[in-house]
Amino acid sequence: MSPPGSIRCGPPAKVNLFLRVLGERSDGYHEIETIFQAVSLHDDLAMDLVAGGEVGLDVVGAELGPPTSNLAYLAARAVLDAAGSDMGLHVRLEKRIPAGAGLGGGSSDAAAALRCANTLLGDPLEDVELADIAGGLGSDVPFFLGASTLALGRGRGERVEALPPLPDAHLVLVLPPVHVDTGWAYSALAERRLGGGEAPRPGSHRDVPRTWGDVAALAVNDFEAVVASTHREVAASLDALRNGGATPALLSGSGSACFGVFADAGSAKRAAELLSRSLPWPSLVARTLGDWRRAEGAVPTSEARRP
């Protein structure tokens, strides 16, 4: 069977159910320990096989800078180069996952572009080759290319261990209008630890969470204190989620997005409606994903209102 000429997918966001920043490595990165969970908020990516050997990219919904620095572009280009193909690819990306929010949108787009490009070219690259490209594109990309929507991440986050799915859960994502630079977050955390005598957390093997009660017991994000103390919008979002009954409520990644887990869909919807009236930025109802099916269903409860 010949490969298709076009393909579409919905690259999903992720949240971090816990995130610990460990010691600094010799290469300047930090060791981390985290659990990634894919959620239903998603971008839309369409890719066409074209002639000419070039990669084109159109982005709708966000200004992400030059196309040649976009991770989806770089992923498509890498597959063409690794396959030695003289064909080209055209990518259309509709952004719903905000940039600089700790939700992994760019990384998810990259993983989707890797899969789509390889499929359109007739699967010239083996999984191990795609995984090698993924690790070079970004620390979170291997998770989105992995086998499970729930995974333990170590190293820079690129060493991924698949975990069995948790029961379906309903979330509220709160999206403050703040872009948090990951490099700044690591530097700020290091300064806080030096100034307060706080040592980096030691690494440990975590028990695999089987229930959301297990998740609530281990939920922590080492970036939360520095990000929330610098950005009042993040602090307000976390307070609102916790006051609204979320268990747990956490910063995702290095922020600025925050999320809370609720008992059921009705509780999540009611909480999001209350948050949309009390916070001047969007709250989204979403769900966890148990597999990598197309993500859909996360919609704003309201448009962002100006403070």
Image (tube, rainbow, N blue to C red):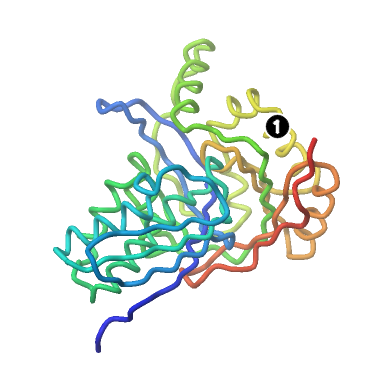
Q: Residue 117's image quarter?
A: bottom left
Of residues 303 and 142, which is closer to you in this image?
Answer: 303
Quadrant of the snapshot with the N terminus: bottom left
- In the rendered image, residue 101, in percent from the top left (x then y), is placed at 56, 42
Dot 1 falls on a residue whose secondary structure is: helix
User: At 49% from the left edge and 56% from the top edge, which residue is drawn?
Assistant: 59
Which residue: 59% across, 32% down? 224
Residue 140 locus on image (x, y percent): 40, 48
Direction from residue 237 to residue 19 in the image, left or right: left
Badge 1 is on which residue? 235
Tell me how many marks there are: 1
Q: Residue furthest bottom?
A: 1
Which x, y percent locates residue 75?
Answer: 31, 55
Q: Residue at x 55, y 61 (%)?
A: 42
Residue type, mark 1 in image: Ala
Q: Which quadrant: the C terminus?
A: top right
Residue 188 locus on image (x, y percent): 50, 21
Name the outermost residue toward the left. 84
Foreground of the two, 211 or 254: 254
Question: Is 86 or 190 nearer to us in this picture?
Answer: 86
Q: Is residue 228 above or below residue 257?
A: above
Q: Is residue 12 left or right of residue 235?
A: left
- Mark 1, Cα crowd under 10 Å, few <14 / some 14-19 / many 20+, is some
